[in-house]
Image (tube, rainbow, N blue to C red):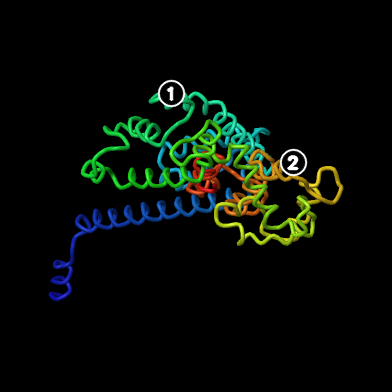
Amino acid sequence: MAKPVKILRNAPRWSTLFPVVLYVLFILCILVLAFSSRNQSEEKHRKHIESGNAHEKPIAPAPLVYRKLEESVVKELSAAFAKADTSGDKQLSVQELAKYINFKIREHIDEAIRTNPTMFVEIDHKPRDGLVSWDEYQTYWLREKGIAGDSHMKKAAFDKLDRKVKESIARDKALWMEAARTDPLSLTLDEFLSFRHPESSTVNLLNLVDDILRQFDLDGDDYLTMEEFSDVQTTDLGEGKKFILSQNVRERKEEFKKVIDKNRDGKADRGELLSYVDPRHPRYAIQEASALFSLADVNNDKKLALHEVLAKSVIFMSSKMIHTAESFHDEF
């Protein structure tokens, strides 16, 4: 009997084991309840997503494009989008976008024609002879840029000018020589409009009509037939004049019948061609709107949402929807 008694004496007492067992059971209960609650929550959330909620829509995260773009760009594009959205459905159709672009084009050209005489008189003062010389214009331009000097500044001072300023002067000089039809050293009022806004000048548009007739009026009768017009190769026009024609022969035939030949006599005279090359013609806005849609309408629903416009912000910011003047001056 001595051995069993010794074993019982060495066994741990219940007073010591009971708290340990109770603590282990408590921990197990906590873990079981936690896992059970988590599983129920996940199951409830899954069923909610699968069945949908008729009263509450899930909040979609804001597109990353909003956070990446500059605030000024988002503000400018959003404002233009709201103005173009005449239906108020928070989406743009190609017709709405084309109508807004046409409005911006007309607004720009009207303003250019209206302000041209005022600027001309302001620059023409040494001497006031009804002509603007290159020296007068260059002095005015440098003053507007906050640059001290004139067209006769010394080479050392000219060399210190910023590279972009030098490039602007060189570009202006080239455009000046194109606009100066009577005297390379000075411009008349109409020539000055052609120089600053070639897209706004009737004289410049008439020159485009002359170019078309000279190159493609095969029989020399001063009219264009549909066959002559559809055979036009845009590569023959040069980079600055490709914008006046569609790229596709079939499209040009359709344009001739529906857009150019207004009196339906089978030929286009100068007046009809002048209307066709005028940037205020709706076809320009329709072409640009269609091009923007092809680049931005990612889901092909024939509608543009604001986030789609913001996703292609660089394209829209350089289009006639936003910066009309700059877009035109890149084309002419």
Residue picked out by circle 2: 271
Q: Is residue 285 above or below residue 112?
A: below
Q: Nearer the viewer, residue 95 or 131?
A: 131
Q: In the figure, is residue 257 to the left or right of 118?
A: right
Which amino acid does the dot numbered 2 rest on?
Answer: Gly
Packing grade of label 1 (10 A; few <14, some 14-19, many >=20) is few
Q: Is residue 21 left or right of residue 69?
A: left
Image disc number at residue 36? none
Q: Quadrant of residue 231?
A: bottom right
Question: Up-down: is 78 above or below 38?
Answer: above
| Residue nearer the viewer, 260 or 2 | 260
Residue 216 % position (x, y): 71, 58
Q: Position of residue 27 (x, y in %)?
A: 32, 54
Q: Residue at x 16, y 72 (%)?
A: 7
Quadrant of the image for the N terminus? Answer: bottom left
Answer yes or no: is residue 317 visible: yes
Q: Which residue is mark 1?
A: 128
- Quadrant in the picture for residue 230: bottom right
Secondary structure of the residue carrying tag 1 is loop
Report if the CB atoms under discs 1 and 2 are less than 8 Å apart: no
Q: Nearer the viewer, residue 220 or 37?
A: 220
Q: Position of residue 8 (x, y in %)?
A: 18, 68
152 in relation to 253, above or below? above
Mark 1–mark 2 Cα distance, whole angstroms, equals 36 Å
Within-10-Å neighbours for mark 2: few <14, some 14–19, many 20+: few
Q: Is residue 60 visible?
A: no
Q: Amino acid at mark 1?
A: Arg
Which mark is in front, 1 or 2? Answer: 1
- Tell me: 189 left or right of 7: right
Residue sitting at 35 percent across and 57 percent down?
28
The x and y percentages for residue 139 are: 34, 32
